[in-house]
Amino acid sequence: MKRVVVGLSGGVDSSVAAYLLQQQGYEVIGLFMKNWHDDSVTISNECPWLEDSNDALLVADKLGIPFQTVDLSEQYQEKIVDYMFREYEKGRTPNPDVLCNREIKFDVFMKIALSLGADYVATGHYCKKSEIELNGETVYQLLAGADNNKDQSYFLCQLSQEQLAKSLFPIGELTKPEVREIAAQMELVTAEKKDSQGLCFIGKVRLPEFLQQKLEPKEGAIIQIDKDHLVYRPEEQQELSSKESLLLESNKIAYTHEMGKVVGKHQGAHYFTIGQRKGLNVGGTKDPLFIIATDVTTNTIYTGLGSQHPGLFRKGLFIEKSEVHWIRTDLALANGEQMEVMARIRYRQPLQKATLHQYEDGLYISFQEPQSAITEGQFAAWYLEDELVGSGVIS
């Protein structure tokens, strides 16, 4: 009998994942990860992880499976929280959920599970795994979940073949309503529970307050750039090589104070991210102001009026060589090679037509349509049909 350790988070998805595995004849063990215990930055008085671990315990009890809690807060602090502070300090916007899967759930947690004699680790992610034979080797595929609305393959875009080999995603074939229905039939305490928001496992954290613990507030200017500014007019270009034009598409515009007018003040450029419109507190504009760039060296935020401001859009992005990650290592591009893919630059974004171009120094992604708010530090993921084949950090 194969043994599976399920990461029970106290939510409905992982509860049903555990139940389904049990139905499939696996020996199931429930493990709750405690990743956070600094209550000074959670928003409400409720202690989210305590409530969640209780719910996880009740579910394990109901299913009659062994249950224990593991405290991974030290590893979480080091691999996720400290990394986030460093990235924000550089003016980048990290994605803690993608990192949490790569560094915690499918690494630290997986090692604990395997030390308990588990054959697999299972989670309540909405995605699917399948396998194919290539030259006598088994190659694992990460596929989008059946529920288009909930597909979470993006969050697993940094997994490796070794991690996928040991992973199971029992609810990948189901939709969210079906999952809730199974939980209700089984009278699981989590059946009606709302989906968790906020950082993976940190609970409800206000990001600026969270960041203020480490990053000192300092006042800077909010500059507004006019949509008709010369910087948005295409210059007459001599003949460019394909790499030069990719570079041009992917490069950020270097804004300066002189290019716009000061419309307000902020408390630190590193608290803000591209495409953001809340929290600027600049009134009196006919359309909302959107952040089009942040500069942490001069501590300046550049904004534009409205969601169609040209400063929000770029046709390309670049991923440094060391940050390019292929789940399907057999498909990795060699220098000078290209690949037509569907790509996304954030979790809920519909897939976009794009072309990958591999060069010595890294990978360019050139989109068919200009993309809004391409953000450094976030992950771009690329797909062939419904298979996620690779990803990388936008640089």
Image (cartoon, helix red, strand yellow):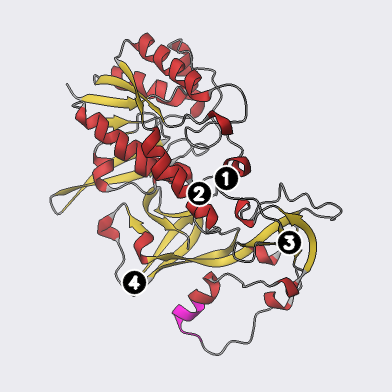
Q: Going from the N terminus, do you reach mark 1 or mark 3 first?
A: 1
Secondary structure of the residue carrying tag 3 is: strand
Q: Is residue 257 visible?
A: yes
Q: Is residue 204 visible?
A: no
**Crowd class of label 2 (few under 14; some 14 to 19; many from 20; radius 10 Å):** many
Q: Residue furthest bottom?
A: 238
Alpha carbons under labels 4 and 3: distance apart: 43 Å
**Crowd class of label 4 (few under 14; some 14 to 19; many from 20; radius 10 Å):** few
Q: Is residue 30 above or below residue 261?
A: above
Horizontal side of residue 61 vs 280, given as left or right: left
Q: Which residues are magenta?
A: 240-245
In the rendered structure, find residue 337 and report the number of the disc placed on it.
4
Q: Nearer the viewer, mark 4 or mark 3?
A: 3
Cβ–Cβ below 8 Å for labels 1 and 3? no
Amino acid, disc 3? Ala
Secondary structure of the residue carrying tag 1 is: helix
Magenta stretch secondary structure, dominant: helix
For the point 49% across and 60% down, the residue is 353
Cβ–Cβ below 8 Å for labels 4 and 1? no
Amino acid, disc 1? Leu
> Label 3, on which residue?
221
In the rendered structure, find residue 85 and report the number of the disc placed on it.
2
Alpha carbons under labels 2 and 3: distance apart: 22 Å
